[in-house]
Image (spheres, grey):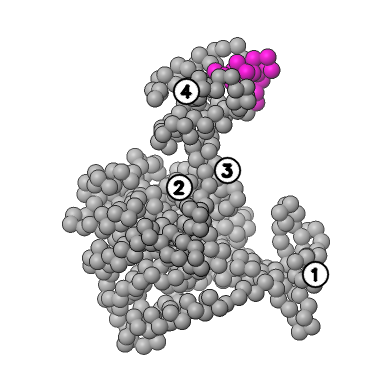
Amino acid sequence: MYSKRHWRRLIKQEKESNFDLRVGEETVTEEIRGTVAGEISAVAAPELVQVEENNEHHLRLPLEEKLTLWAGKHSETRMCFDDILEIFRSEGFSLPKSSKTLMKIEKAPLRPVAPGSSYLLLDINIDGAPLFKSNNASLWPILGKVVGDTNKNVFTIGVFLGNKKPFNVSCYLHDFILEMQALKDVGFSIGGKQFFVSVKCFICDAPARAYVYGTVGFNARNGCSNCIQTGTRVNNTTIFNTAVAQPRSDEDFKLRRYGNYHKPMLDSCLSLETIGIKMVTQFPLEPMHLVDLGIVKKMLKALLEGQTKNFKLRPESKNSISSRFLSFVPYIPDEFARKPRSLVELRRWKATEFRQFVLYTGIVALKDVVPEEYYYNFCLLHCSYRLLSVKETYQDNLEVATDMIKHFIELFPDIYHENLVSYNVHSLLHLTQCVQETGFINSFSAYPFENCMRKLKRYVKNPSKILEQIYNKVTREVFQIKMEEITKKRLNKYEKVIGIQTPTYLLNLKPKNKYCLLKTGTAIAIQSFGPDGQVLYGNNC
């Protein structure tokens, strides 16, 4: 393995050779292209060149592919590969910052492991919720979801009932761990096909994550779960700065090297680690609580309550924003669970309303109403959040989104007061790393699990035999799901197709549901449907 100094020396020698390199544009002449490719190949994979020195095709490979081949041949860590890419970038080569972007690593929810066998990944959610307003009874269910399921069906694994959260988290997770170990090693069979099961990630909010971790809470001075930065206490609030400290690692967590960050006499993490769970990288920051109910709600409240530094929103400006929200109502598609509401009802807004605001309506409602610096700061959050939410392109936009988030955090104390730079604002700096390791934002969001939690609470009709009521309902629900068929088209009384329904969208002839974007990039307004519902007729927008 070469040292960083040796890498720099090789690159310097290469750059001083007889060819000209421009960022993003090769100006190497055809006569010396093979020679240059050979030199680059010698830097990237010296052993490979010795074996394939007469392979002309290999000599003409781009630098990106040669680095990828080198990484596949040698068992170097991803951190080492990232450092090498940084050296190349510092010398003027146009390469991505991350090895995952260079190697185009994609996660497959279903992967064959043997003839007649398949490998299933699960997302696991752990959270608590109060059951009644009249007493302290609360539910702590363990929920699961198959990765890649377009229907987003959430199933119940187990439920704890008590007046507070389970005291011993090891006992709480004991049966789950034993069952997951069996499913991972032995699997199960359906229709003669063998399935093995593993966990992709745990989707938890900050309090639940600290509970399962066995660590201090998020409001502690060293409460950040992704880096070792230490905050300060100001008016009973832990304040962090706008920079990222040394990141926490799975290995250091396993060896308990973070001192008082780990709570004593708690072995929950040891239990999860016995089934191969990585306690840092497999616990991504949950975006619903972090962004929607955290940062976006904080920004709106600060705007309305005058907690900004250099301006205060006037009543007529608040009314103008509310009027714009209400004017959007007739045009909000049915895919949105809730329609926009006035700012007067901000305290009653749900998480989906804050998400709708930051991703869709806010960029229009705030324009020319709030000061330019506030609007610019909001646009940074809007754009970065949007880039990380698109499944098809999020990997290509990680660097841009990271820069936007850093700039957003840097400007945050200048627009708001410093005491608002709390855990959620600081943790936003780690969001792109979670996206890089886990997938696009919606793939580890808690929204499907929150819907299931609300459904479990509805199953309870009286305060006696609560767990029995939930069990009986969940058992019947499983059979209903197996019998249920997804409606793909909607018919009127004359048996004419008037709409198309899928698990992810609805199209019909109503003004709010008739606009769509084709894969070619063309936006159309639907005028009618074909007899089978598979053909659309419309006009270009």
Between 113 and 513, which is closer to the camera in this rendering? 113
Residue type at mark 1: give it. Answer: Gly
Which residue does the numbered mark 4 point to in the structure image?
47
Is label 3 in contact with label 1 (beta carbons under 8 Å)? Answer: no
Kindly tell me whether residue 178 is visible in this rendering: yes
Give the spatial CA distance, label 3 vs label 2: 14 Å
Which residue does the numbered mark 1 point to in the structure image?
530
Q: Is residue 27 magenta?
A: yes
Residue 452 location in percent, x, y?
A: 45, 72
Which quadrant does the C terminus fall into?
Answer: bottom right
Label 1 SS: loop
Residue 500 location in percent, x, y?
A: 70, 70
Which residue does the numbered mark 2 point to in the structure image?
437
Give the spatial CA distance, label 3 vs label 1: 37 Å
Is label 2 in contact with label 1 (beta carbons under 8 Å)? Answer: no
Residue 532, placed above or below residue 87: below
Residue depicted at x 22% and y 57%? 267
Which residue does the numbered mark 3 point to in the structure image?
396
Residue type at mark 4: give it. Answer: Glu
